Image (tube, helix red, strand yellow):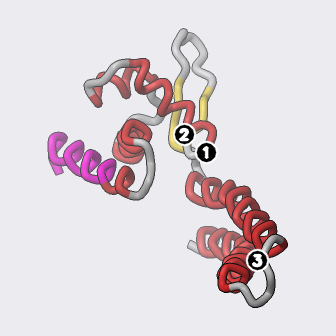
Amino acid sequence: MGDQERWQAAERLALVLTEGGLQRMSARVLAFFLFTDADTVTMGDIADRLGVSAGSVSGAVKALLATGLIERLPAPGSRREHYRLRENAWPTLFSTQNTMVRVMLQAAETGIATTASGDPAHARLAGMRDFYQFLLAELPGLLHRWEQTRTSR
């Protein structure tokens, strides 16, 4: 795959990520991290490759740092900060979803408490609660099984 095809594939992935709910610049920056052959990169490297301002990259990098997908690295002798895709990016991201699962669970429980048992909304909210309780209980085992498959390779 040539360089041009490689970066076209990265842009296609970014489009899919955007359609999946990620902010456009965060999606493009994440795709950059997935497709780059560099061990570490600076915001300037990303901005140059994507043809955008360093300011727009900065917000995306902060968002990806907050989700745990990328990490900041020390770069002795460099005045710029260096970043890379986290080694266990996907399990880390999935683990942070526990917070959202708990928020959804709490929202369902709050709704259940404010509706009567015969109310259709009560039944729908109970289904929501049951799903998120199930998901929350399954996540640790799922991540453990993932780690087992990784170490057995």
Q: Is mark 2 on a helix, strand or loop?
A: helix
Label 1 CA crowd tier, 10 Å (few <14, some 14–19, many 20+): some
The magenta region covers: 1-15
- Residue where numbered disc 2 is placed: 64
Label 3 sits on what residue type? Answer: Gln
Q: Distance between the residues labelled 3 and 1?
A: 23 Å
Picture residue at 56% right of the left edge, 10% below the top: 77
**Residue 5 spot, x, y in % from top left:** 16, 47
The label on residue 136 is: none
Give the foreground label among 2 and 3.
Answer: 3
User: Could you tell me which residue is drawn at 63 percent across and 72 percent down?
Assistant: 146
Q: Earlier in the sequence, mark 3 or mark 1?
A: 1
Say which mark, if any, is on residue 133: 3
Nearer to us of marks 3 and 1 is: 3
User: Can residue 25 be found in the magenta stretch?
Assistant: no
Q: What residue is pinned by disc 1? A: 67
* Residue 138 visible: no
Residue 50: quadrant of the picture: top left
Q: Which residue is drawn at 41% across and 24% down?
A: 56
- In the rendered image, is residue 143 in sight? yes
Q: How many labels does the image show?
A: 3
Kind of residue sitting beneath label 2? Leu
Determine whether 46 is above or below 28 in the image. above
Q: Residues within 10 Å of mark 3 (few under 14, many from 20)?
A: some
Q: Which numbered disc, 2 or 3, marks the residue that appears first in the sequence?
A: 2
- Secondary structure beneath disc 1? helix
Left or right, 33 with reference to 141: left
Tag 1: amino acid = Thr
Instruction: Indicate the quadrant where residue 42 lies.
Output: top left
Q: In this view, does 43 lie to the left or right of 69?
A: left
Q: Residues within 10 Å of mark 2 (few under 14, many from 20)?
A: some
Q: Are marks 1 and 2 in contact (CB under 8 Å)?
A: yes
